[in-house]
Image: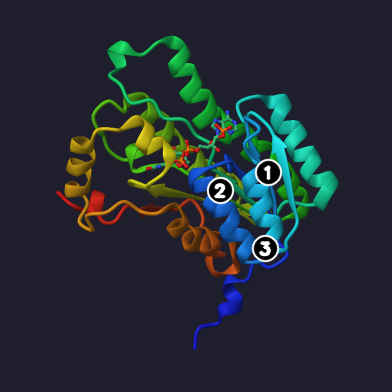
Amino acid sequence: MINTDLFNIKSKVALVTGASRGIGKAVAIGLAKAGANLIVCSHTSRLDDTVHIVKKIGVEILGVKADVSKESDVYQLVKQSIDSFGRIDILVNNAGVYINKDVKDFSEEEWDLIIDTNLKGYFLCARTVGREMIKQKSGKIINITSIAGLGAMPNTAVYAASKAGIIGLTKGLAVDWAKYNINVNAVAPGDVATEVTKEQHPDHEYMARVLNSIPMHRSAMPDELVGTIIFLASRASDYITGSLIVYDGGWTAMI
Ligand SMILES: NC(=O)c1ccc[n+]([C@@H]2O[C@H](COP(=O)([O-])OP(=O)(O)OC[C@H]3O[C@@H](n4cnc5c(N)ncnc54)[C@H](OP(=O)(O)O)[C@@H]3O)[C@@H](O)[C@H]2O)c1
């Protein structure tokens, strides 16, 4: 019989970035249902709904407005988390932005937005939370990357650069922080049905082509990622570090 206690994250403290909507919101709610206490952030003030839902589940939650690309915001986010909960056991680096266009049309500001949020933001959160985890001598860091970090898709070069960078950051941190009992892993979703995918790809023809490339012929729903996150946040994955779990309905398996 499976030892379900291996997956127990009850009373653990989890920080989820970019939890106002999409994957981050679903992951925060999923971790709360599994009994974890939460700190959530986004850079606007749209966290109310996530905070409301999590409170109703019956665990503790702190919602903080913070821009992950700003060192001072991340410092305050982590300070408030430690002041409130005393520790951070799980970090889900999720806050990200996506711009779909050819590099020839990209501005410097757009490059900076993507790299500062998707890559620098993950570095700043991992570093600042990691310092606390090093003191605790334990921690689980889960970086949400993308299959765009593994292979090219049209008009995603800059996004792909940021997501490939996250895979490198994950492996490097895993190597350096294994000695502190900190596991660092990445999850690479394929197509997940969130607001950003609808905003960036409103045309049905594009989506039909995407779905045709996915052996399962459907997008993932955001809450389907929760099981993988709980696995990587729990004792069940204690010997896994520097790994990438591809969550794409078989998209990258197809040639
Ligand atoms: N959806 C997909 O198909 C897909 C596939 C592969 C990978 N991913 C990755 O999964 C993650 C979440 O994607 P999603 O589809 O859920 O995106 P989303 O619906 O656009 O949500 C993004 C979240 O990140 C937050 N955010 C953006 N910039 C931020 C900043 N500078 N500081 C703090 N928070 C910030 C947003 O907060 P605000 O409310 O403040 O804007 C929002 O909560 C991203 O890293 C994305 O690259 C998504």
Q: Which amino acid lies under the numbered mark 3 shown in the image of this protein?
A: Ile
Q: Position of residue 34 (x, y in %)?
A: 61, 66
Question: Is residue 228 at least partly visible in the picture?
Answer: yes
Q: CA distance from mark 2 to mark 1?
A: 22 Å
Q: Residue furthest right?
A: 83
Which label sits on residue 93?
A: none
Residue at mark 1 = 130
Q: Position of residue 199 (x, y in %)?
A: 38, 32
Camera-near label (2 vs 3) is 3
Question: Is residue 184 at least partly visible in the picture?
Answer: no
Label 1 environment density (alpha carbons within 10 Å; few <14, some 14–19, many ≥20): many
The correct choice, above or below, for 200 with respect to 167 in the image is above
Q: Which amino acid lies under the numbered mark 1 shown in the image of this protein?
A: Gly
Q: CA distance from mark 1 to mark 3?
A: 28 Å
Viewer-proximal residue among 111 and 25: 25
Q: Position of residue 120 (x, y in %)?
A: 56, 28
Secondary structure under tag 3 reads helix
Residue 130 figure quarter: top right
**Residue drawn at 59 percent across, 45 percent down:** 176
Q: Position of residue 123 (x, y in %)?
A: 58, 34
Camera-near label (1 vs 3) is 3
Secondary structure under tag 1 reads helix
Q: Which amino acid lies under the numbered mark 2 shown in the image of this protein?
A: Lys
| Left or right: 78 as drawn, with respect to 91 | right
Residue at mark 2 = 25
Q: CB of mark 2 within 8 Å of CB of mark 3?
A: no
Residue at mark 3 = 57
